[in-house]
Amino acid sequence: MRKLVWVFAMVAAYLLDVPGARATATTTTATDDPAAASVQEGLPFQLGHQFLIVVKGTVGGVGPLRLIVDTGSTRSIVTQSVAKQLGGTKKNAMVLNFNRQIKVESLTVLEVRIGPIVARNVTMLVAEPKDDSELFADVDGLIGLDVLLQGCDDLRVDYRTHRIAFGRLNGRESIPPFRVLTVELTVQGQPVRLVLDSGIQNMLLYEDRIHKHCPGIQLSHRRKAREGRLKGTIADVSGIELAGKEVQMTTFLVTAPKTLITDDIDGFVGFSVFQSEMVELDFRSNVVHWR
């Protein structure tokens, strides 16, 4: 289970009262590709543990660093070791970690660069991913929507060539309002709204919201589980419609926080669930393509 949840735990901690933009999700062919003309050639990435998108970049002139690109996180993160190299004054902050708040530190960085994207005056959180999972022992941080949206309006992840491309580069001087992209999947004939998150491998559901929004949903083979700070339940969910087929998937179930994450979000889903060679996100139009 260590491949499933740790990054999600970090992501959930930093979704502070963030609305979800409903994305129009489509399956495209090579010729049905409206964003392709605006997307640059692309930046090489390593596929960590078969799902993490790891790129090289610099933070405050420090680097090259190994950074995870995470479309489900509104805030970017650096490790303590990188923060020490950056210097500067750290501030205390409180963030939500599912149903409890935890203390963290933050640090303002003059510039963050990954490929053609340049984000300035970014307030990054300081955390130690490796304390929660050995999967993150060799990464220096995480790039969230605060950096991505300041630098571009769409991105494309090509799993065949291991390149991530950023399109419609905008070079904003400030960070726009955060909006996580959500997709609607059909589960056992009922709609489920999930944040589209490149930082998890499978699916994580808020069990109380699933039962509220999808009465009668069947969860089988339940067993208790723990992932770092996160306690929950693993269960099998059948009847998930993907690409015209119904599949069964093992998911991690937790109780939704009482505040800060909008009530209509039922959980998170990773890119790998769609078993696609390419995923494209259009933040401006709230459109997702996979093929």
Image (cartoon, rainbow, N blue to C red):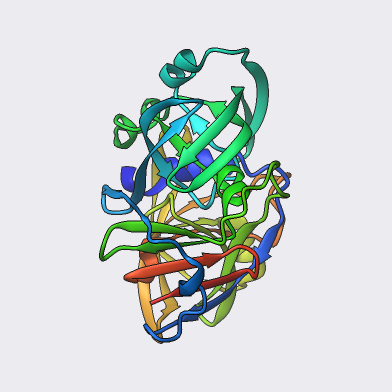
- Percent x, y of residue 37: 48, 73
Q: Is residue 245 left or right of residue 93?
A: left
The quadrant where residue 239 appears: bottom left
Kindly identify the residue that appears in the image at 30 percent across and 37 percent down. Answer: 135
Nearest the viewer among 16 and 168 is: 168
For residue 134, say whether it is visible. yes
Q: Which quadrant is the C terminus positioned in?
A: bottom left
Q: Is residue 17 left or right of residue 272?
A: right
Q: Is residue 232 left or right of residue 17?
A: left
- Percent x, y of residue 185: 53, 74
For residue 202, say whether it is visible. no
The quadrant where residue 246 appears: bottom left
Q: Vertically, is 30 above or below 151?
A: below
Kindly identify the residue that appears in the image at 47 percent across and 48 percent down. Answer: 116
The quadrant where residue 192 appears: bottom right
- Percent x, y of residue 141: 43, 33
Q: Vertically, is 2 above or below 238?
A: above
Q: Is residue 46 left or right of residue 268?
A: left
Nearest the viewer among 232 and 146 is: 146
